[in-house]
Image (cartoon, grey):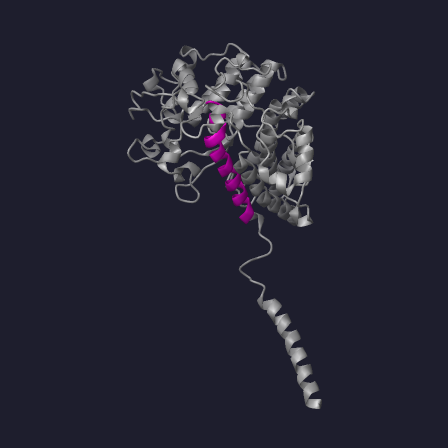
Amino acid sequence: MKLDKIILIFLGVFIFTSCEKFEEFNENPNEPTEVAPSVLMPSAIRQSVNTMVNESFLLGNNIGQLTSKTLRTEADTYNWNAFPTVWEGLYGSLTDVKGVEMGAIEAGNELQEGAAIVLRSWIFANLTNAYGDIPYSEAIDGDNNTLTPAYDSQEDIYTDILSELERASNLLANGSGSIEGDILYSGDAAKWQKFANSLRLRLLMTASENISNAGNQFNNIVSAGNIFTSNEDNAILEYLNTFPNEFPLIQLKTGDFDAVALSETSLTVMENYGDPRLSRYARPDNDNYDNPEFSGAVSGAGSCGKSGSRIGAAYYNDDAQTTAESLGIGNADGIILSYSEVEFLLAEAAAKGWISDDIETHYQAGIQASMDYYQVNYTPYGYTDFNDYYNNSGVAYNEVTDIWEQKWLSLYFVGLEPFFELRRWYVESGMSFNGIPFLSAPCDNLNNNNLPMRFRYPGQEQSLNAANYNDAVDKLGGSNDINASIWLVE
């Protein structure tokens, strides 16, 4: 009996000690429970920019008629589904952004926090611009067991994003710390501040019809300065030349890349001016950059004429044709926001009377900034330099739709902005293509020649977040429809 008790006591102590030891052994030092912002930041930037590069290729450029689909023409014909890769890709990157922001707050690193806020704001702006009301204030909050986040109104989201960007600008101007893992601006807080303020200008213009004091807010930002003033300020991700950090389209199969071609719409406009960006946006059909020849695919259904020049050499490597390297331009960047766009924003703000600057000065600067960024060669198009091009091509400023046209051309491969801007111009033109002289409804589209207003919510929301999804759809009028009215178009 005594022996049995001794054995039981011994076994109890052994099991208790073993459990403690097991817990110690079960802690893997190679899998930390917290990840430093310096590790999460590059992942957050890369994933979000990669998503927008892919969506510019598949959706943005095609909806905006800068390019045209030669296969699977859903984007061109307005036969839209939920485009779930937009939703999933951007919400997925927000997980890392939140990790950066929380880590920065915990460490008291105000500059890192400011940069994270700017990145978060840009990502959420893309989501709400695409879908309307979306999970925002409760999104990415699974660590607090918020697994079915409510949908915030688009108006509230815009109000908060603009406020958060102003807060970020102040943190980046006056805060302490450093921006670690920054593959966008290499830790330069001043450039992040310019990015924050320039993004505010974009969003104010996007929502200009719905924010009563948008002009005053825009003027105040411009007056305070610290916005983009040259191509050195561009918010772009410069890709490397090796997998997995190369331009996303480089990895495509040839057939997938050739499913998109230069559109007849953009070709017509650019050939009318002799625009030298043609040799950057597309490959000459004759592969002769000294005497280039191009063709354009019709935007719309596959029966409408789908033969067009291949997308430019910077967007895909093909050793059988002239390469970007041989042209001295390198592979393409991931463009978030450019100095060229800011100049067009200033030009249109001047035309609206928001600022007192000269319209044409900003308009001309916007075109030149785009030309300089793409390192164009004027000679094959019959011009000696930019001034010769501006003065003799017919592109000189005359009316506000000229700003729209040249901004449209400059938005090539800038995420979903070609769609967002086209929608704004369409609304300002009385819900019609008639007020946009360089565009028209795509051939044989399936939406009665009407531009859709939004993407559908993904089907997974209906199953995983049903109550909040249903509330959001009710606010759209009861249907998750591409023509439903969202706040930006009301």
Count of numbered marks: 0
Q: What's the residue at 66%, 74% (across, down)?
A: 16
What residue do we see at 40% from left, 31% from top? 259
Q: Position of residue 219 (x, y in %)?
A: 64, 21
User: Residue 375: in sight, yes or no?
Assistant: no
Q: Quadrant of residue 482?
A: top right
Residue at (60, 54) in percent of width and height = 34
Name the chief secondary structure element in magenta: helix
Judge by depth and name the residue closer to the eye, 378 or 284. Answer: 284
Asked where in the image residue 222 lies, by quadrant, the reply is top right
Residue 339 screen position, x and y as percent: 51, 26
Q: Is residue 305 above or below residue 117?
A: above
Does 327 sit above or below residue 97?
above
Horizontally, is 4 left or right of 234 in the view? right
**Quadrant where the N terminus is found in the figure:** bottom right
Place of residue 341 in the rendered image (x, y in percent of width and height, measured from the top left): 52, 24
Q: Would you identify the image quadrant in which residue 208 lies?
A: top right
Q: Is residue 384 visible?
A: yes
Q: Which of 92 and 162 lies nearest the eye of the viewer?
A: 92
In x, y percent, where is residue 70?
Answer: 40, 27
The boundaries of the magenta stretch are 39-65
